[in-house]
Amino acid sequence: MIATKGYAAQNAESPLAPFSFDRRVSGPLDVHFEILFCGVCHSDLHQVRNEWGHEIVGRVIAVGEQVKKFKTGDLAAVGCLVDSCRECDNCKQGMEQYCNDGPVGTYNSYERDGKTPTYGGYSNQIVVNQDFVLRVPENLPLEAVAPLLCAGITTWSPLRHWKIGKGHKVGVLGLGGLGHMAVKFASAFGAEVTMLSTSPSKKEDAKRLGAQKFALTTDATDTRPLKSYFDFIIDTVSAPHDYNMYLRMLSTNGVHVCVGAPPAPSEVRAMSLIANRRSIAGSSIGGLPETQEMLDFCSSYNIVSDVEVIAMKDINQAYERMLKGDVRYRFVIDMATL
Ligand SMILES: [Zn+2]
Ligand SMILES: [Zn+2]
């Protein structure tokens, strides 16, 4: 086993604290890498604070004898997944996130053997099968690449699936970790982007990130002209909100894509969908091929996340600030401080 240093919460109430554990032994198909940065994702909070990080970038320190894709010294990354069945229709199409057998999560999960825990990225090193390791371009600031592995791919995947680009009007609901990436990608794809936010203080940032328009969703003078306006809405909000209000903003055949997950069910009126033949849909992270495609695109177009780098010991304080929305737009832990 590989002795590993990390940070973890022992139960839902306790703060994160230093923690030592063993990683599984590195096999012939595995990539063993030192973690340099790990993003702090909001869904970490959903894991009743018993969580571990899944926006992981680092440098390879060893590879198994059958590993062809990586060599020692390469940059490498891991997102939310470290394995899947690889045999179902979804896996075969590179949609491992929808594996029919349930993919193996990077944290709070067990390897395919059903007994080896996966420990996530709040740690100094990780061992992952090469098929679930991403190549990281050398030309981007590494700390700002980390959030692409979850916040980035979560917004990239639906934008690509619905072929959103030039000629489309896109509303991005919520400007946080997910929202700021949705704005960057949608505008890079050539869409007209409107930021939909409850916070007037986000207006300047939305423009800087690439949004052409800004609408304060609490102000009827802003929202009234948006009736039947958008082709797509990317909804990143995980707090309770009224879907009907936003569905009304969709034009004919418009699609409201949920990537944020509010804790409680919400009421959707059939008439909100019937008018203009609208749809409401959801999308979860992305598969390995499209995650690599995203990283390569980011390398070509110089796109990264806006981050605030923190020391490991400041993680609990960062959580408190994240709960208040006080981060622009992702905390990333410098693992050298572990
Ligand atoms: Zn995440
Ligand atoms: Zn599968």
Image: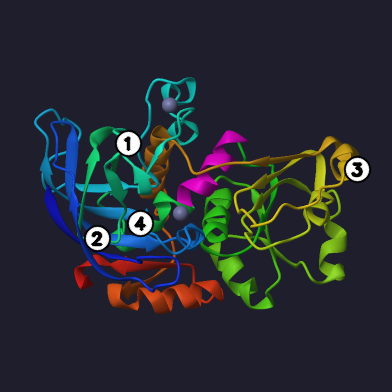
Q: Position of residue 250 (x, y in %)?
A: 80, 46
Residue 241: in magenta span: no
**Callout 2 amino acid:** Ser
Q: Is mark 2 within 8 Å of ligand 1?
A: no
Q: Nearer the viewer, mark 2 or mark 3?
A: 2
Left/right of residue 149 with respect to residue 215 in the rendered view: left
Q: Earlier in the sequence, mark 2 or mark 4?
A: 2
User: What's the distance in space between the residues labelled 2 and 3, CA to CA?
Assistant: 49 Å
Rounded to the nearest angstrom, the CA distance separating label 3 from label 1 is 45 Å
What residue type is disc 1 on? Gly
Q: Secondary structure at mark 4?
A: helix
Q: Secondary structure at mark 3?
A: helix
- Residue bearing mark 1: 114
CB of mark 3 near ligand 1 (< 8 Å): no
- On residue 271, the disc is 3
> Residue 161 lies in magenta, yes or no?
yes
Q: Amino acid at mark 4?
A: Ala
Question: In the rendered image, which quarter contains the C terminus?
Answer: bottom left
CB-based contact (under 8 Å), mark 1 and mark 4: no
Instruction: Report x, y in % for residue 105.
Output: 39, 44
Q: Residue at x 50, y 33 (%)?
A: 98
Q: CA distance from mark 1 to mark 4?
A: 28 Å
**Location of mark 2 (residue):** 123
Query: Residue 101 falls in which quadrant of the image?
Result: top left
Q: Residues within 10 Å of mark 1 (few under 14, many from 20)?
A: few
